[in-house]
């Protein structure tokens, strides 16, 4: 149940990102649901591989290169899907930062909600 709620809230967060920042466009709520799923899969499967492969750069940049990896995941998802568009790497970087901030809020809220059984 928690996973489904997080997926729905992540889709809502993508819509919020699109409404707050003009560099990200979402066509519909169904496009946001698919985009949230694809971003989640990319972060689960591709991100760990990229983090390991770019570990020297990440260490030299004191972890700031992780923002680039997040932006690449966001941009790649937009490149694969219809109804989800990002206007370039800079827009992907800012959009992924906003989306990550919403993700932290969602995780915090869900942790509190599902702990109070």
Image (cartoon, rainbow, N blue to C red):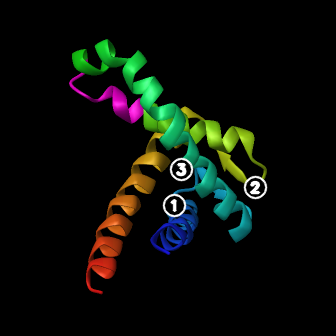
Asked if 110 appears above or below 66 in the picture, the reply is below
Q: Residue at x 39, y 62 (%)?
A: 102
- The verdict on residue 66 being magenta is yes
Q: Residue at label 2?
A: 83
Q: Which residue is mark 1?
A: 17
Tell me where residue 78 sits by quadrant.
top right
Q: Could you say which disc has been placed on residue 40 in the image?
A: 3
Q: Residue most toward the right? A: 82
Mark 2 vs 3, N-terminal side: 3
Q: CA distance from mark 2 to mark 3?
A: 17 Å
Circle 2 sits in a helix, a strand or a loop, which is it?
A: loop
Q: CA distance from mark 1 to mark 2?
A: 14 Å
Local packing at callout 1 (Cα closer than 10 Å; few below 14, some 14-19, many 20+) is many
Q: Which residues are magenta?
A: 61-68
Q: Seen in the image, is 52 located left or right of residue 10?
A: left
Circles 2 and 3: CB atoms closer than 8 Å: no
Residue 13 seen by the camera? yes
């Amino acid at each position: 149940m928690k996973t489904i709620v997080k997926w729905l809230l992540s889709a809502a967060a993508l819509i919020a990102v699109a409404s707050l920042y003009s560099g990200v466009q979402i066509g519909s709520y169904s496009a946001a649901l698919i985009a949230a799923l694809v971003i989640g899969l990319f972060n689960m499967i591709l991100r760990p591989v990229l983090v390991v492969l770019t570990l020297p750069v990440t260490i030299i940049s004191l972890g700031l290169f992780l923002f680039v990896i997040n932006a690449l995941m966001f941009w790649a998802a937009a490149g694969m899907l219809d109804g989800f568009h990002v206007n370039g790497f800079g827009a992907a970087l800012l959009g992924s930062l906003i989306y990550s901030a919403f993700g932290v809020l969602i995780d915090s809220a869900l942790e509190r909600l599902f702990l109070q059984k």
